Image (tube, rainbow, N blue to C red):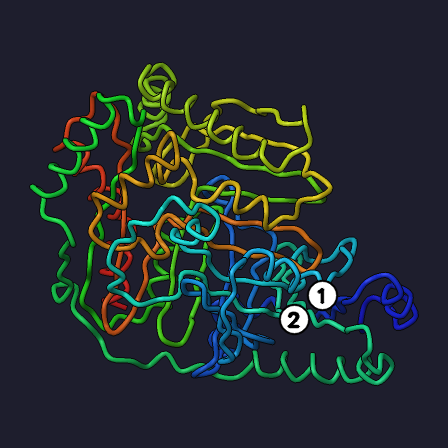
Amino acid sequence: MLYPSLEKVNELLEEYQTVPVFYEVLADHLTPIRMFRALKREGTPCFILESVENSNQWGRYSFIGVNPKSEIKIQGNEIDIDGNKEIVEDHISYLISLVKKYQSPMIEDQPYLTGGLIGYFGYDTIRYVEKRLTNVPEDDLHMPECHLCMYDELIAYDHLTSKAIVIQNIYQGDDVKRVYKDLEDKAELILKKMERPVSLQKDRFEAGDIQVKSNLTKEEYEANVRKAKEYIKDGDIFQVVLSQRMEVESDVDPLDVYRCLRTSNPSPYLYYFDFVDYQVVGSSPEKLVGVDQGIVTTKPIAGTVPRGKTKEEDQKLVEQLMNDPKERAEHTMLVDLGRNDIGRVSKFGTVKVNNFMTVEQYSKVTHLVSDVQGELRNDKTALDALMSVLPAGTLSGAPKVRAMEIIDELENKKRGVYGGTVGYLAFDGNIDTCIAIRTAVFKDGKGYVQAGAGIVADSVPAKEYMETKNKALAVINAIKEAAKL
């Protein structure tokens, strides 16, 4: 049975341009990965978004999209929508006007994502609004700076009820009665496709075939750290995040990498995107920005220790982290940066820090996390909020713009997806995005994994180099594990 009723849909279409309709069925014999494999089609963009809370509890919904309404790629001042290219000076206003055409209501007791723009904004999209960043590093991967698909048809898997929910949208101007009637047949067809047998037969690879190399030598990275420390000493910056990009040559299936990553490194933001020419796979612990019914939130993470082998060791490591003056100072600086970013789009006097420097534990690490919130100004949108925070201070530095200029000088390649954001801008005006870390890009038979370290006045170059290597391990190990499946 469809929900809401035809009568309610007609009523909502008097106020909104788009109304989601839901059809659900018991699917306790299926899994999100099984459903995704059955539904995805060769040559068509698709995605799966999932979440694990508190390191061991699945978020309520897994979302699947396999049939985009349109595809949007942005590179420089050129925007490509379904192969039609045009020059655009103000990318953000263009996207805001696009989403406003599909404004939809939130439907109570139903999945929170019912359609919208879903994909990534790369690190370099900040150049659309920050014109000082003119020294652009080499673009050797040749990927869009921003790649989004508009989905008006989704499948949600409800982990609480073990039901599959087909979500479809009806628009103002549709023959509503006919479209509504057709939706039930369409939903049942989608559900039948999910039941199809899925072939898992493929070539096997040995883990020994996986070789990892970097775009920087150890000596080059450490020289960058020393140069950054000179800028800090001269008063240009307080901190800068310098990264290196590791490259893996392998024909491993990126979806298998996602399968391994979601089990070995469960995080609040799990994602697999197939953009046909390349794939983006990630397990990010860190929210960049969210907007939910007018409340803007960012959650800076700064301060990390590994989990202990015993409960006692775990507690000891947490206490050391909480009492480390360097970690506390860095965290406070990044919270202040988050307050400034949120403040640019929030109503005066509404920005506040909730749960300052609290401990969040995941499967492999413990983080210090704070929660910064504000009320979105009436003249601002969720996309404005995103651009006010992008890129996160934890991936750039402070002061942010000067730190990014130094990154452009010292890193020899464009960052691409790394350090940008992955998530969605929903038809109902809400947004939820994470920082693109613990993420791999697969393109032309190679996988790319990038990781950085926060450089401060007393940083030791060799230790910062090892930190970047260690941060990349979770994804590198997932690639190696996937090669053995």
Amino acid type, mark 1: Tyr
Q: Which residue is mark 1?
A: 102
Q: Position of residue 208 (x, y in %)?
A: 12, 63
Q: Nearer the viewer, residue 362 or 88?
A: 88
**Where the N terminus falls, by quadrant?**
bottom right
**Where the C terminus falls, by quadrant?**
bottom left
Cβ atoms at labels 2 and 1 below 8 Å apart: yes
Left or right: residue 25 compared with residue 81: right
Amino acid type, mark 2: Asp
Q: Position of residue 194 (x, y in %)?
A: 56, 78
Label 2 CA crowd tier, 10 Å (few <14, some 14–19, many 20+): many
Q: Which residue is mark 2?
A: 152
Q: Quadrant of residue 468?
A: top left
Residue reaching furthest left?
219
Q: Position of residue 423 (x, y in %)?
A: 52, 55
Q: Position of residue 172 (x, y in %)?
A: 81, 73
SS at mark 2?
A: loop
Seen in the picture, residue 109 relative to 306 is either above or below; the reply is: below
Q: Residue 157 got which mark?
A: none
Give the Cα distance between marks 2 and 1: 10 Å
- Please tell me which of labels 2 and 1 falls first in the chain: 1
User: Residue at image x 60%, y 66%?
Assistant: 28
Q: Quadrant of residue 75?
A: bottom left
User: Residue at image x 36%, y 26%?
Assistant: 311
Q: Nearer the viewer, residue 457 or 357?
A: 457
User: Residue at image x 38%, y 32%?
Assistant: 366
User: Residue at image x 53%, y 41%?
Assistant: 388
- Of circles 2 and 1, which is in front? 1
